[in-house]
């Protein structure tokens, strides 16, 4: 059934979109900052993955072991150098610090790698599995599985480890969490690092599926924002639903509408949500963070 | 009319600038200055909405594009003079800006910015797909038929003076704001919107007014751009890069001040030129790297922009004269 | 001047204000007292339009202003101050007050002149060019008062305007409020400083748990056993 095929592809893609967005929503939930450079860090992850493959023939999925911690460390560095200093600053500083970062990173990539579209061709990249009447790209399936594992891993981390609980406490009531002895700075730093680490993994699983080029981040970051706003800024479960829904929408609209108009669908959804229901599907308590009185 | 020392200096500078084309015959430099005028206009217009109005738009290029496309389509398809097209584009941009502003008015800072970003992207997609109207991804060229009515000129001098006049408009508006009801209301809203409302400030209306003016001027800049560069590329004219560059100039120069954007435009333009000649055309992206980093640095270290460095000198002198008491006892 | 009927508001499961009803007459100084959490500030916010009302009406000078936005309510002549002061921190004292001055004029000079007059009235003139955030709390409260006075209100709602003031400052503020009332301003004040309420107010409303507990002259309510039990405590002397 063609429709089933479309739906399955959409869900698989959606799973990857979840991983793409979860870092963004986590960072917003804890640091209350909208990271406009989210896409640029994805780009770094993808280039990193690409280089590991090109130079040392390390498969992107294996490369996660290097790229994810690498992005984590980059996250720590960026937090200390930039983010920390704009957390208490007015909106202008927060927005444009990350925008400036994004601009600098994208153009550095342009300088170093030029505007070429670079791809990773693994031996199994073209394998297509056939289950019944459904055809699934192996890379997409693996990507989906990794994304799901990591997402649930993250949920588990947040629920069961001390650090995870500390992070959740910070989202809920900052003052109380400080009073209980949670070291706020450390939480912010770690959270930002984790957020970027998830991008590291997302970048690695995207490499077999998409080419990398300097502005690839912009393309995906808009999707990430739509997912996060749809699900509710700061709400992780929301990001999960949002990702799957957007994946489905992309798959369906790709079939029914021309590809160039596909993007239009996202942006219109995005604006509609911001205008009509800014807290997204699940962000009941978060309305006040998005909308002023 | 009493003219303060400051005003006399400013007018002198203006007079000197106005005389440049009479003295300088070099097209390269004239072109650079005309570009500065254009950027100063665009940054100045953004500054009105963002610096004074507090609405941090990351999609301002959308209005640039609306202005450019409106006047050019009217010119190319219906032979309407770009002067009228400029007005039409401005009014259209204003209307769209107010509508968008009204819909997003309650969104907090970064979310408002995201909405404007999305809007700019939507405009790109529309422009690229509405081939019948906009010639799609090919872009539109403005035909070279020099005449005043066509706003197309053989040489640079006419563009120079038009550009000069245009870039002064945001400055005059900003200065007007500093001594007017709407200006005070905008300051109040920026400081504490709830308190402002309790004093009768109709914050929605005030913000929309400043949005209307800012987007109008941005669109006017768009028309000027189209007429000067003579070509509109839909991927560039609505782009985030362009919006960022405009905002960047205003922020680095000094948001919320009349001259900040001009200073930003001048500095960035000179920096561009320098980098281009020092590194050659192969390193096309380098200047953007520098700007990106500069933006981060300024926003963290000198949040009021470079112009605040000059103002501090003035303030210190005034304070020393008046015997400033900053700690007050009952 | 002010008529409130059946005002009700819930926040989630909590009934913060429950069918509150009272009147404030022209030129009165009315006090709104009650224990913390009684719903006084919520009630204020409902009157001035900052919070929507779940039920009930607010009539100001015989006009129904229920649910109107704060800026509109203010322009109609109902002004308010905030419990935690909200000065325009980076603006000078004069500029702060001028924002109020523009309420009924578009003219810069007129607004400035009016602001200067008001500053004179509250005795803040010598601080007029000082940035608002450098003022100590007592003067900030006076600034907040000056600012709203500049909008020519007919009814002034003061939310704990005496909170955080020293004894001397309290006396000064009481005198100022009395002066303003003598000039024709009706006042509704939320207060915890009972000495002020007793000396200033000719009409008092007592709120407890979101409901009106009692209403009357200061003497009457200090003798009211319910009020004593809920808030005042035994042995309170109305003089």
Image: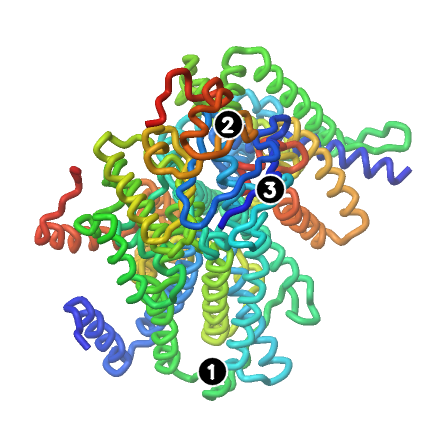
Q: Is residue C137 something one can see in this rendering?
A: yes
Mark 2 nearby-residue class (10 Å; few <14, some 14–19, many ≥20)? some
Q: Nearer the viewer, mark 3 or mark 2?
A: 3
Q: Which chain carries label 1?
A: B
Q: Which of marks 2 and 1 is in front?
A: 2
Disc ID at residue B204: none
Mark 1 nearby-residue class (10 Å; few <14, some 14–19, many ≥20)? many
Q: Which coloring applies here?
A: rainbow
Q: How far apart are marks 2 and 1 (CA)?
A: 71 Å
Q: Distance between the residues labelled 3 and 2?
A: 17 Å
Q: Nearer the viewer, mark 1 or mark 3?
A: 3
Q: Is residue C50 something one can see in this rendering?
A: no
Question: Mark 1 and mark 2 in contact (Cβ < 8 Å)?
Answer: no
Q: How far apart are marks 1 and 3 (CA)?
A: 68 Å
Helix, strand or loop at mark 1: loop
Q: Mark 2 lies on which chain?
A: C
> In this rendering, would B72 be left or right of C36?
right
The answer to whether C150 is drawn above or below residue C20 in the figure is below
Disc ID at residue C38: 2
Q: Residue under circle 1?
A: B152
Q: Residue under circle 3?
A: C5
């Amino acid at each position: 059934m063609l429709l089933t095929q479309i739906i399955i592809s959409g869900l698989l893609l959606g799973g990857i979109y979840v991983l793409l967005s979860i870092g963004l929503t986590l960072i917003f939930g804890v640091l209350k900052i909208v990271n406009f450079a989210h896409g640029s860090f994805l780009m770094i992850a993808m280039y990193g993955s690409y280089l590991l493959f090109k130079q040392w023939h390390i498969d992107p999925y294996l490369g996660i072991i290097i790229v994810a911690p690498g992005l984590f460390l980059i996250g720590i560095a960026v937090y200390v150098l930039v983010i920390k200093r704009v957390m208490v600053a007015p909106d202008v500083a927060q927005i444009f610090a990350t925008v400036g970062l994004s601009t600098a990173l994208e153009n550095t990539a342009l300088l170093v790698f030029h505007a070429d579209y670079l791809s990773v061709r693994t031996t199994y990249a073209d394998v297509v599995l056939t289950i019944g009447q459904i055809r699934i790209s192996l890379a997409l399936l693996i990507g989906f599985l990794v994304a799901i594992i990591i997402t649930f891993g993250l949920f588990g981390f947040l629920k069961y480890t001390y650090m995870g609980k500390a992070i959740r406490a910070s989202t809920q009531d900052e003052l109380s969490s400080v009073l209980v002895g949670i070291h706020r700075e450390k939480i912010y730093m770690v959270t930002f690092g984790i957020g970027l680490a998830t991008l590291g993994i997302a970048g690695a699983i995207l490499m077999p599926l998409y080419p990398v080029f300097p502005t690839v981040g912009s393309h995906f970051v808009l999707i990430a924002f739509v997912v996060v706003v749809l699900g509710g800024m700061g709400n992780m479960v929301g990001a999960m639903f949002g990702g799957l829904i957007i994946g489905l929408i992309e798959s369906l609209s790709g079939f029914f509408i021309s590809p160039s108009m596909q993007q239009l669908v996202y942006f219109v959804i995005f604006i509609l949500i911001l205008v009509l229901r800014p807290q997204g599907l699940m962000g009941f308590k978060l309305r006040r963070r998005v909308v002023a009185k | 009319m009493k003219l303060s020392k400051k005003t006399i200096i400013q007018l002198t500078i203006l007079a000197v600038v106005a005389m440049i084309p009479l003295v300088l015959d070099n097209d390269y430099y004239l072109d650079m200055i005309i570009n500065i005028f254009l950027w100063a206009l665009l940054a100045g217009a953004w500054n009105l909405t963002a610096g004074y109005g507090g609405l941090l738009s990351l999609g301002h290029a959308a209005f640039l594009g609306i202005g450019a496309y409106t006047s050019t389509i009217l010119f190319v398809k219906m032979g309407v003079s770009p002067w009228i097209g400029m007005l039409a584009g401005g009014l259209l941009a204003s209307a769209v800006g107010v509508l968008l502003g009204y819909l997003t008015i309650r969104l907090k800072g970064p979310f408002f910015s995201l909405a404007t970003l999305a809007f700019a992207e939507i405009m790109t997609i529309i422009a690229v797909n509405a081939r019948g109207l906009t010639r799609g991804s090919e872009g539109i060229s403005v035909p070279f038929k020099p005449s005043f009515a066509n706003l197309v000129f053989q040489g640079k001098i006419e563009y120079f003076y038009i550009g000069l006049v245009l870039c002064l408009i945001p400055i005059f508006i900003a200065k007007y704001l500093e001594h007017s009801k709407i200006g005070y209301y905008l300051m109040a809203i920026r400081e504490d919107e709830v308190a402002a409302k309790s004093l009768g400030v109709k914050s929605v209306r005030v913000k929309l007014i400043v949005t209307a003016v800012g987007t109008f001027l941005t669109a006017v800049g768009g028309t000027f751009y189209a007429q000067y560069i003579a070509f509109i590329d839909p991927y560039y004219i609505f782009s985030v890069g362009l919006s960022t560059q405009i905002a960047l100039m205003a922020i680095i120069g000094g948001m919320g001040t009349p001259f900040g954007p001009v200073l930003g435009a001048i500095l960035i333009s000179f920096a561009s030129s320098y980098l281009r000649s020092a590194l050659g055309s192969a390193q096309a992206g380098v200047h953007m790297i520098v700007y990106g980093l500069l933006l981060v640095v300024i926003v963290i270290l000198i949040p009021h922009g470079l112009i605040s460095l000059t103002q501090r000198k003035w303030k210190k002198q005034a304070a020393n004269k008046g015997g400033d008491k900053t700690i007050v006892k009952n | 001047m002010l008529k409130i009927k059946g005002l009700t508001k819930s926040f989630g499961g909590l009934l913060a204000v429950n069918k509150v009803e009272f009147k404030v007459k022209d030129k009165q100084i009315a006090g709104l007292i009650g224990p913390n959490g009684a719903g006084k500030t919520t009630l204020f916010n409902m009157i001035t339009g900052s919070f929507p009302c779940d039920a009930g009406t607010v009539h100001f000078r015989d006009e129904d202003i229920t649910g109107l936005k704060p800026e509109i309510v203010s322009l109609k002549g109902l002004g308010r101050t905030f419990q935690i002061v909200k000065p325009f921190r980076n603006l000078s004292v004069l500029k702060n007050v001028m924002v109020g001055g523009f309420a009924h004029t578009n003219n810069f000079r007129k607004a400035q002149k009016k602001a200067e007059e008001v500053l004179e009235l509250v005795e803040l003139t010598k601080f007029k060019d000082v940035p608002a955030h450098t003022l100590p709390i007592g003067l900030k409260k006076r600034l907040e008062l000056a600012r709203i006075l500049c909008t020519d209100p007919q009814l002034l709602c003061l939310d704990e305007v005496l909170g955080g003031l020293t004894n001397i400052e309290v006396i000064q503020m009481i005198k100022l409020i009395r002066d303003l009332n003598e000039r024709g301003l009706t006042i509704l004040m939320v207060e915890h400083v009972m000495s002020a309420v007793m000396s200033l107010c000719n009409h008092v409303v007592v709120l407890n748990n979101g409901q009106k507990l009692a209403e009357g002259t200061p003497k009457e309510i200090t003798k009211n056993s319910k009020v004593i039990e809920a808030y005042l405590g035994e042995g309170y002397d109305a003089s």
